[in-house]
Image (cartoon, rainbow, N blue to C red):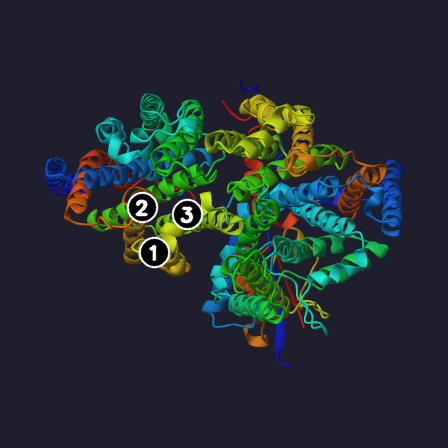
Amino acid sequence: MAAAPKEVIQPDFRAIDRGVLRAMEPAGRAYWIWVASCFTLVAIAAGFWLRQIYEGLGVTGLRQPVNWAVYITNFVFWVGIAHSGTLISAILFLFRTRWRTAVYRAAETMTIFAVATAGLFPLIHLGRVWFFYWLLPYPNERSLQPDFRSPLVWDAFAVSTYLTVSSLFWTMGLIPDVANAREAATGWRKKFYTIVAMGWQGTDRQWRHFSMVYLLMAGLATPLVISVHSVVSWDFAMAQLPGWHSTIFAPYFVAGAIFSGVAMVITLLVPMRKLLKLEELLTPWHFDNLAKVILLTSLIVSYSYATETFMTWYAGDPIEQMTFQMRYFGPWGWMFWMMVLCNCLIPLLLFSPRIRVNLRALWVISIFVNIGMWLERFVIIAGSLKVNTIPSQWGPYVPSITEIMITVGSFAWFLGLFSLFAKFMPIVSMTEMKEGIVWLRAALKRGYSTGA
Amino acid sequence: MNTVTIIGSFSGEGECARAVRAVRTARIDDFHTFSPFPSHKIAAAIELPKSPSRWVALVGGIAGILTGLAVTIGTTYEWRLNAGGKPLVSWPPFIVITFELMILLGGISGFLAFLFMSGVPAFESASGYNSHFGEDRFGLVVRCTKEDADGVESMLKTAGAEEVVRGV
Amino acid sequence: MASNADAQAQPAGTTLMAAGAVMAAIGAISFAIALWSGDAQIAWEAYLVNLLYFLGIAQGGVVASAAFYLTQAKWGGSTPYRLAEAFAPFLWIGFILFFGLYFGRAGIFPWVLHPIAQKAAWLNTPFLFARDGIGLGLMALTSFAFIRVSRSEEARTWAVAGEEIDLPPHAIRFWAPIVAVLYAIIYSLIAFDLVMSLAPVWRSSLFGWFFFAGAFWSAVVAMALTAVVLRGRLGKENVFTNPVFMHDLGKMVFAFSVFWVYLLFAQYIVIWYGDIPVETFFIVQRVHHMPWSPLSIACVLLIFVVPFTVLMSVRAKQTPAVLGGVAMFGLIGMWLERYVLVVPSLSRDALPLGLTQLLITVGFLGAFIVCAVPGINLTARAALSGEAIGGGE
């Protein structure tokens, strides 16, 4: 199917630098309107949060029995998004995967801002936000201590560790790149980059320690990623609630996290590639491989749904079977079937090599996956609470305007931060692209098809 | 002072590595290199031992394990909560906390070791730095005596240096 | 000269096959004797444990080869593929022996003599043997279709092609995903039907995944052991002497051992925390009661603690004796794991681990060796062919 090979200019190191640094040139009006809109939405959401702090959680739709709903869904959703960034930057680094270099900086950046967004939600859900420090062990007169046997405390430690270690890993990778940007910059930018680059010059001494610690951090981040989303899944699996108490949750949630996260990477990267003119660095080959990760994790998620369904039927526990029957055919059944469509069926299109490199189709599929995965968390969390073991406790849940606006605000917060970073800091790792330039050249030479 | 600084600029890591080997064979050890990315070839030519930062990270990780155990076991004895009949010191949850703290302290100490050992933040520029060493050129900066200077310069040129500059 | 090279290229010669055949015969005879002398229960238990164990290694190997293609692994030319596929012929033996379980079903499946009304639609003899039989047959068929394509000229050229980003041949891209996906589905089914149903009240949704992940690891470990043995026997210039090859195998052993213990912990902590009696009894019996407790601890030691601590350093992974030793322990550990999963459900308090079990195990091992010999010879030939190893770094 190869057409006559078009004359492709093979990039050299300077071309990589040019491509990435050009993306950091001062932005036009459209960009600032976009950023301003994002942060306006954030301000509105912050206003709703302030009102919630003042008036209490009653302004939300949370009642008994559904006392965990949109906020916790958002929490799990954003932590899940964060995981794929670390997968791409750390786990694929250990596997020496070739296509990782062009996308890992953007993915890792997505991680940082996604965790920052996720971390807000336990605080938002707390109501009396100022008491958050009760989760930490500190000496006090009444000898009160956090209960380390509670999964919520594990969550606090896991997510904080994840935010810290990911930030350090991300910062490390940035230093050489920002040093490069420092050289090319002028004015206040030069001062800014000089401070961030901390005097890095790429001597053998510096690279020696950099390489070792980078490998170490990748090695630490790998089990961390798996443990964090396992801990988040155990917020639910530790309960005895039907629909929550299931041993498969840990690896199932981790796979789901990577699934939704890589979809979000594609959602961000396809437009970013166009807007920042990075077409020569982010080739269809990179997207082809990202799409394969989505396909694999989609299959794992489908496996998990099927296994849970089978196990519920096999176990024969009438209460659990009732919960699942409500999940499929109850008032919120439409959400479940939308979720199956978005997570299990639509990604099957990615078996086609042609669709995997069709960036528009890929982008649309990624949007469906994001929707499907958000719905999945809601269906599990709120859906299981709604029809708990005592029918007299069953009750309605409708998200209030506060919850909706804060959800919208969280997306705006994430997109705004990411957009700021993409314009002011190197969104593609120049250092690693140069290290792996032979792969970039091979990908470009292959043209825009993925082979026979 | 009898010393002279010679700066060689190379377009490829192979050439730079060759130059490093030549200089080292001539028993001249006061040099450093610049590269836009960590080059295995240059590192192999310099034959540096593995960075000791991994030991710092190991110590940090062990400190994390001990902290995790101390915090979980200590607090559970201080506030003896009956949580569903689970034993006061229950290892499954405590392993989770201990594991997270191990990674946290291991990662932080590794990062700090990196900063400290690399001399970052650096307030003085390493001699001979030129901005193109961060873009697409590899640099070798040698400090030697005036007598050796000519020999070093020819070594660098033989290895394939694009540009050799002598400074003081 | 020529005969020397021949001998080197055929390290697993006719003597090994003969030994394997003798072992298989011994096993069959002890099994028959046990059946006749009234020890049928322990005979069938040993039969089931070994069937699951060796089928796992054989099938896991094929899946490993598929996984190597799907991740475009080029760290050893075509040798890793031949090595992974070497155990595959046992799949047919396993398929046939599976139906042998029919004759012992009364002693193996508690629900045969005491049917459970609620689960009767799923746990009944005809349906179970039909679905698992078809599953195993399908797995064997697709595995061999895949292997045939994998041994083709086109695939071998691709594997030796060095560091490029081209995808494997089209036929491989068709069969490899099928093998991988079917493996997850069918071996989960096998786990639910042949292990979980032995304690029909118990369930764990992660159990299928846990079972086939363990089977995959046992295959990786068998590959590591085979590589170490071949390295010694093949003389000077072979792929196995490249330290990078050993390093990569060692990394796989390390990583999937951690994955196994993660899946184990994920089940343990959920069941422990929920403290629901219908779930906890399974674990309590195996972990906290004699005589099973020391065996469970041994499993964790051999499958996780030893590989994790010993194989942490790069040098340990590259030392054949160390890797081989860890692999040996791992294989024993995995057999014990299958044993601890199956037997306590059937023989509650006694510890049936005596001569009969040993001889039946020897029998299965012999059959396995006979099946593996041709594949191992192919591997040796690939290792000696002097092809370039992709990506030596």
Residue B163, how many percent across, how many down? 62, 57
In the displayed structure, B76 sits above or below B133; it is: below
- The 10 Å Cα crowd at callout 1, few under 14, some 14 to 19, many 20 or more, is some
- The chain that hosts pointer 2 is C
On screen, residue C140 versus residue A254, left or right, reads left
Kindly identify which residue carries mark 2. Answer: C344
Q: Which residue is mark 3?
A: C281
Amino acid marked by disc 1: Ser
Give B135 or A194, whichever is nearer the viewer. A194
Given the image, on which type of amino acid does mark 3 rest? Phe
> Which chain is home to disc 3?
C
**Could you say whether the residue bearing mark 1 is in a helix, strand or loop?**
helix
Q: Is residue A79 visible?
A: yes
Q: Which residue is mark 1?
A: C293
In primary-sequence order, the first of circles 3 and 1 is 3
Displayed quadrant of residue A364: top right
Q: Is residue B140 visible?
A: no
Chain to which mark 1 belongs: C
Q: Amino acid at mark 2?
A: Pro
SS state under label 2: helix
Q: Is residue A50 left or right of residue A294?
A: right
| Mark sitting on residue A26 | none
Residue count near mark 2 (Cα–Cα under 10 Å), binned few <14, some 14–19, many ≥20: many
Residue at (57% x, 48% y) in the render:
A238
Q: Which marked residue is nearer to the observer: mark 3 or mark 1? A: 3
Real-space Cα separation, disc 2 to disc 3, in angstroms? 11 Å
Q: Which residue is located at x 57 percent, y 42 percent?
A: A254
Residue A169: where, in percent of width, then height? 63, 56
Q: Earlier in the sequence, mark 1 or mark 2?
A: 1
